[in-house]
Image (spheres, helix red, strand yellow):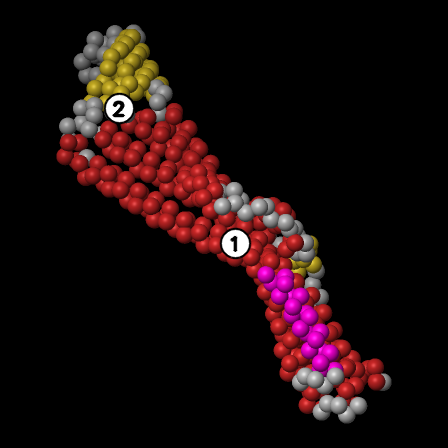
Amino acid sequence: MKSWKRYKILLLNLSICLVSSGSVQDTLNISVNALFERGLDYNLKLYNDKIAENIARNRTRAAIWAQFPDIELKMETGGAGNSLYPFSYWNQHYEATVTQPVYHGGKIGATVRASRIDETIAILRHRHDEGEIKLMLLKKYFNLVCEYARQDIWRHNMIQSQKMLDDIRNLKREGLVTNNDVLRAELHLTNDSLSLSTVINNIIIISQELDLLLGLDENYIIKTDNNELDTQLPDRRNYDEYLSAAYHNNPALMISEKIIESSKNKVRIAQAAYLPQIDFIAGNTLARPYSGYGFDRFNNHWSVGLSVIIPISSLYKNRSLTEMAHNEVISAEIAARLGTQEILTKLKKAYLRHSEAINKVTTIKLAIKQAEENFRIMKNRYMNQLAILTDLLNADALCIEAKFQYISAKAEAMVTFYELKQLCGEL
């Protein structure tokens, strides 16, 4: 009976955690590699990027085929006659024409270049979106890793709080402490259980978010790899190395450069409208009856030559389009500079946060040892009535806070490491 009373509060608090977690749910173990594989396969944005790549690729092929000759075959048949001759004839007309572009002011070549630039932009945008989605998945994944670590800490702390409550009850029976200390210890244990309940609910919420992103049933509880926070990170590079890698490999910067190139190419296309168009043309016509004479026989007619079109009206119609193309170049250059500034800001911030997190991990390791030693000393002092319960509870809170800071620092070190890789185009 005494044993049941002793652990009644602990069982009650654990039941609160079970109620907060709802019904029993299936779990699914997912590593970082599995997270990437499933997350990228299911993501609709990346699927749309693949479609955009295919569209750009086909547009390039169509632009290349525009350099080849246009070949047309025309066939007509039917009755024919006129009022001068009392005869009617069966009309047949066969015609073949070939038009080969020779010179269109460079417009055809510029159009091919524009299509190839758009294809490259589509590929880079897919790569950029893939890096951002990986980083987003990693942030949620490491949030979940941290919640599982906090869950273990609270569960361990609840067992410790129960032992502390038992010791205080023994002291009360010996008349060394008042009932107030017992009530405060029970309240401390209840607060621990409520904190554990909050962590369990956080696990359910984050798991549902990942379930939806990975195309899973939303009721799955995602189990993370507990060793992810202990992964040994590569040696930290200096800032200049990260900066150089970002300039050379960041997809967003490369997209900006391609947009400038595309804008300059549009200027060439606009200027081509001022220049003449020269085409090589050839044709052959086979028709009956011989038109104009009423003879029912085939007439074969062929032609070979050049077609020259001089667009005089473009001197005043195309002026605004050319000016607009020049302004688009200036706008693209400004957008590229703004994009570069934004990426450099993110890179600097990620580098400093990564360095800070690594330093925190080293520092907080010592802080945890100090907090645990402080708790041990306070517990001994309290048991010998050399300290009050408030000091003991404060020492317990400091110990938990140090462990939480350690978990957060390790998670931040991992996330900022991947963020640096994403900004350098390496994720």
Q: Quadrant of residue 176?
A: bottom right
373 in the magenta segment: yes
The amino acid on which the numbered mark 2 sits, given as a three-letter code, is His
The amino acid on which the numbered mark 1 sits, given as a three-letter code, is Ser
Circle 1 sits in a helix, a strand or a loop, which is it? Answer: helix
Query: Where is 91 relative to 193, above or below?
Result: above
Choose between 174 and 155: the one closer to the eye.
174
Start and end of the magenta stretch? Answer: 363-383
Q: Which residue is mark 2?
A: 104
Q: Which residue is mark 1?
A: 355
In the image, taking residue 25 as reference, residue 331 lies left or right, namely: left
Which dot marks residue 227?
none
Choose between 85 and 289: the one closer to the eye.
289
Choose between 219 and 345: the one closer to the eye.
345
Q: Quadrant of residue 119?
A: top left
In the image, taking residue 82 as reference, residue 139 lies left or right, namely: right
Name which of mark 1 and mark 2 comes first in the sequence.
2
Q: Of tags 1 and 2, which is closer to the observer?
A: 1
Question: Residue at (82%, 82%) from the top-left corner?
Answer: 4
Question: Residue at (64%, 51%) from the top-left corner?
Answer: 231
Number of on-image labels = 2
Query: Where is 178 relative to 192, above or below?
Result: below
**Are there few (<14), some (14-19), or many (20+) residues within 10 Å of tag 1?**
some
